[in-house]
């Protein structure tokens, strides 16, 4: 385990127990609260609506929000193979980011080119997500 | 000191472990609260595993039984409705936590040397999280025809109308087989979580070794 006493002065350090442990417990409680708020207020799964509407055959459930960009991609690009190639290339580029971003600067917003590329990538995902929702 | 603690301490040096990792451990002051997103992702994963094990006790991965088993969980099993909805909401919260953690690491450039492999394992975990969530959305019967199977939906909403192996027709004319559901189920409950646990072990070992990144 990393020993911070070598790189920091005693004034810059604090005990993990109880300080950090309490912070972690607090955010875990917040997470649990968020989950229960979701249980209380998020709409019921599509199951009941399917039961009611399946007789007419007009019901088409949509994937959850985080899968909508991929769903939108499959809807917009007719070839399944092209979709899988695009997704595979995107995933490889995403995973290998530290090996092709060799700049010394750490902050993304200070890096010309990469910052714009990330913003464009986020906008494309947003557009695909929105199109997946309405297509 | 007597009792179970000293018994464990004698065999596994528990006191030393607790001192090294908790009571005598020092960390830098003023850490960002957003740094907790990685740990929260792990907590969300643990909640998913717990609620998932509960659901596994009731869910039957068969096209003719899935609907009824889910109805049983939601309406008859004690607190089944709560656990089922917690699993559904928990998946979205987990994806949110992992996504937030990844965006923070990306924007602050925390993947730089010597943390390149932290990113590789973390990005793989993000993609695996999306995959496990996707396979999960294919399990409830109302989702069978979400992406590529349309004709099957009508029959699936009425479990008695489902044939033994073929339950629908995809737009490209291929038949939607009953075998597909156990495949998604096995991926969702066994293969992908196991791979995720392996990547997590790798990720946390490296994070412990290098420690947190210095502030910008």
Image: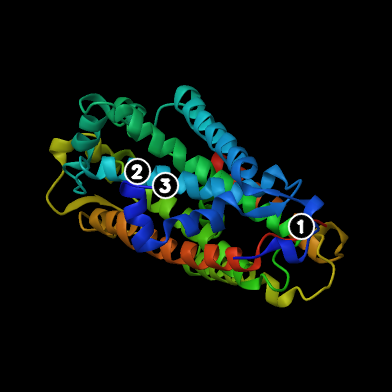
Distance between the alpha carbons at the discs numbered 1 and 2: 33 Å
| Residue to which mark 2 is pinned | B50
Q: On the picture, is B17 further left or further right than A111?
A: left
Tell me the quarter of the image containing the C terminus of chain A.
top right
Q: Is residue A74 visible?
A: yes
Q: Residue furthest front?
A: B1
Labels 1 and 2: the sequence-earlier one: 2
- The percent coordinates of residue A42 (x first, y second) are 48, 27
- The percent coordinates of residue B81 (x first, y second) are 31, 28
Do residues under tags 3 and 1 come within 8 Å of each other at their CB atoms? no
Q: Chain of mark 1?
A: B
Categorize mark 2 by other alpha carbons within 10 Å: few (<14), some (14-19), many (20+).
few
- Residues at marks 3 and 2, common chain? yes
Tell me the quarter of the image containing the N terminus of chain A.
bottom right
Distance between the alpha carbons at the discs numbered 3 and 2: 6 Å
Do residues under tags 3 and 2 come within 8 Å of each other at their CB atoms? yes
Labels 3 and 1: the sequence-earlier one: 3
Q: On the picture, is B20 further left or further right than A117?
A: left
| Residue to which mark 1 is pinned | B108
- The percent coordinates of residue B84 (x first, y second) are 34, 34
Q: Which residue is pictured at 63% across the width and 48% down the height?
A: A16
| Residue to which mark 3 is pinned | B46
Q: Which residue is pictured at 41% across the width and 27% down the height?
A: A44
Q: Residue furthest top?
A: A40
Question: At numbered mark 2, what does the secondary structure look like: helix, strand or loop?
Answer: helix
């Amino acid at each position: 385990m990393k020993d911070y006493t070598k790189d920091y002065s005693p004034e810059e350090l604090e005990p993990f127990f109880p300080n950090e442990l309490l912070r972690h417990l607090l955010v875990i409680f917040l997470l649990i609260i968020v989950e229960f708020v979701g249980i209380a207020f998020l709409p019921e799964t599509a199951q009941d609506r399917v039961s009611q509407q399946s007789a007419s055959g007009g019901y088409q459930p949509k994937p959850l929000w985080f899968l909508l960009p991929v769903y939108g991609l499959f809807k917009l690009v007719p070839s399944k193979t092209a979709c899988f190639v695009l997704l595979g290339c995107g995933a490889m580029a995403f995973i290998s980011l530290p090996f092709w971003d060799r700049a010394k600067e750490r902050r993304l917003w200070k890096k010309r080119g990469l910052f714009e590329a990330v913003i464009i990538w986020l906008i494309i995902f947003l557009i695909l997500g929105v199109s997946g929702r309405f297509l | 000191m007597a009792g179970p603690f000293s018994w464990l301490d004698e065999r596994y040096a528990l006191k030393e472990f607790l001192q090294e990792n908790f009571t005598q451990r020092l960390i830098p002051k003023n850490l960002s609260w957003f740094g907790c997103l990685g740990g929260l992702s792990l907590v969300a994963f643990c909640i998913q595993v717990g609620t998932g094990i509960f659901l596994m006790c009731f869910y039957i991965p068969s096209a003719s039984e899935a609907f009824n088993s889910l109805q049983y969980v939601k309406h008859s099993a004690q607190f089944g409705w709560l656990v089922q909805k917690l699993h559904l909401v928990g998946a979205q919260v987990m994806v949110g936590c992992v996504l937030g953690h990844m965006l923070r690491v990306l924007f602050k450039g925390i993947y730089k040397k010597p943390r390149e492999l932290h990113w590789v394992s973390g990005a793989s975990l993000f993609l695996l999280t999306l995959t496990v969530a996707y396979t999960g959305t294919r399990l409830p019967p109302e989702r069978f025809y979400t992406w590529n199977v349309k004709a099957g939906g009508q029959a699936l909403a009425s479990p008695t109308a489902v044939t033994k192996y073929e339950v629908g027709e995809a737009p490209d004319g291929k038949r939607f087989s009953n075998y597909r559901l156990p495949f998604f189920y096995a991926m969702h409950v066994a293969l992908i979580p196991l791979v995720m646990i392996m990547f997590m072990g790798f990720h946390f070992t490296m994070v412990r070794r290098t420690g947190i990144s210095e502030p910008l």
